[in-house]
Amino acid sequence: MSQTEVLAGKTAVITGSGNGIGRATAKAMAQAGANVVVSDVIEADGERTVQEIVDAGGKAIFVKADVSQASDAENLIATCVTTYGGIDVLVNNAGIGGGQLRLHEIVPEDFDRVVNTNLRGTFLMSKFAIPHFLAKGDGRIVNIASTYGLVGAPKAAAYCASKGAIINLTRQMAVDYGHDHIRVNAICPGYIDTSLGRRKATLSQEEFDAATARREKAAGMQPLGRQAQPVEVANVAVFLSSDGASFMTGSIVTVDGGCVTTFNYGEASN
Ligand SMILES: NC(=O)c1ccc[n+]([C@@H]2O[C@H](COP(=O)([O-])OP(=O)(O)OC[C@H]3O[C@@H](n4cnc5c(N)ncnc54)[C@H](O)[C@@H]3O)[C@@H](O)[C@H]2O)c1
């Protein structure tokens, strides 16, 4: 096994892998030798990720799933096990932002939508994967949280609450499953150059440009002074899923260019 094939023979499910960090993680895991299950609510985006993996010589299938729905989450894990004979790695990446509102302005349904996707989705996917990890005596879960789960950030109540909960859920799961050789870690990305929080489909061009400018300005004020590319998060997800991280569980790993070591969050919000 070469240094680059640290996941050879493993099977990995990555939720929300039709775009951004999820897509980069699916590609990085395939490159590291894993069989990959790409999953997303948007079929065309997920199929594009699969195509990019296959074109690069990797192995991947697509399964459509909304992680907030128990039946979808159960079917996603079952399809992975049927297709590849098991599951070794679960990356709970699917997530959405919550709009630019203060708490009293948020309608309850929108709060629920964010929490159901980010937190309930992480719970459901883990719930259906863990029995397979227990049967095998080995498993690796990587939860994609956020620096916004470590601190308060402007106009992001639902998002901050859901990500903070994912961080402590990560620690809790590490406690419950450590003796079963199931490692559970979280990554807290900072400003990553994806379309999260500024989706063109739901924003006017003016709003999209303003959101992009806000993020670039906020990222510019952090120690490394820039947004990251999704692959810079994906590389850490591969490491945490590999035997190289064999003594890591319950770890909350910031991949944020030094963001939470400072005070300044500018005007940007996810
Ligand atoms: N981009 C950042 O700056 C940043 C910072 C911190 C944390 N994160 C986290 O990283 C993760 C990935 O975000 P991204 O920036 O790549 O965003 P993105 O919008 O580019 O990708 C998210 C993907 O998740 C999918 N998705 C949304 N709801 C879903 C659902 N219910 N079920 C399944 N899939 C669903 C979307 O279709 C999309 O393909 C999220 O959890 C996000 O909160 C991102």
Image: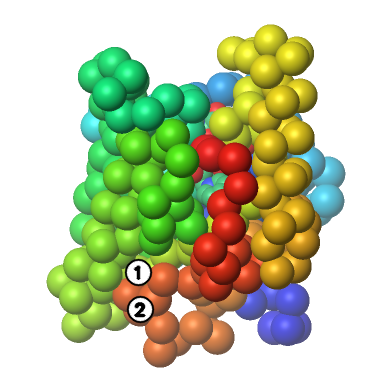
Look at 34% across and 37% down and name the residue there.
157
Left or right, 87 with respect to 173, comes to right
Considering only vertical position in the picture, is 113 above or below 212? above
- x and y percent of residue 249 in the render? 35, 78
The one of 235 and 180 positioned closer to us in this rendering: 235
Q: Pointer 1: what residue?
A: 184
Q: In this view, does 118 lie to the left or right of 3?
A: left
Measured from the top left, where is residue 125 in percent x and y? 32, 45
Q: Distance between the residues labelled 1 and 2?
A: 5 Å
**Left/right of residue 196 with respect to residue 104 in the rendered view:** right
In front here: 64 or 18? 18
Pointer 1: residues within 10 angstroms few (<14), some, or many (20+)?
many
> Considering the image in quadrants, where does the N terminus appear?
bottom right
Residue at (20% x, 67% y) in the render: 172
Label pair 1/2, CB-CB below 8 angstroms: yes
Residue 23 can be seen, yes or no: no
Residue extending farthest right: 55
Residue closest to the far top: 204
State the mark number for residue 134: none
Task: Check disc 1 and report its element: helix, strand or loop.
Answer: strand
The residue that disc 2 covers is 249
Dot 2 surroundings within 10 Å: few (below 14), some, or many (20 or more)? Answer: many
Q: Tell me if the residue at label 2 has its CB under 8 Å from ligand 1.
A: no
**Given the image, on which type of amino acid does mark 2 rest?**
Thr
In the image, residue 199 lies at what x, y percent? Answer: 63, 23
User: Which residue corresponds to the image point at 41% horizontal and 83% vertical from the top-left?
Assistant: 248
Which one is in front, 117 or 221?
Answer: 221
Q: Can residue 42 be seen in this view?
A: yes
Label 2: which secondary element = loop
Q: Which amino acid does label 1 sit on?
A: Val
- In the image, what residue occupies the spot 59% across and 40% down? 267
Toward the viewer: 39 or 119?
119
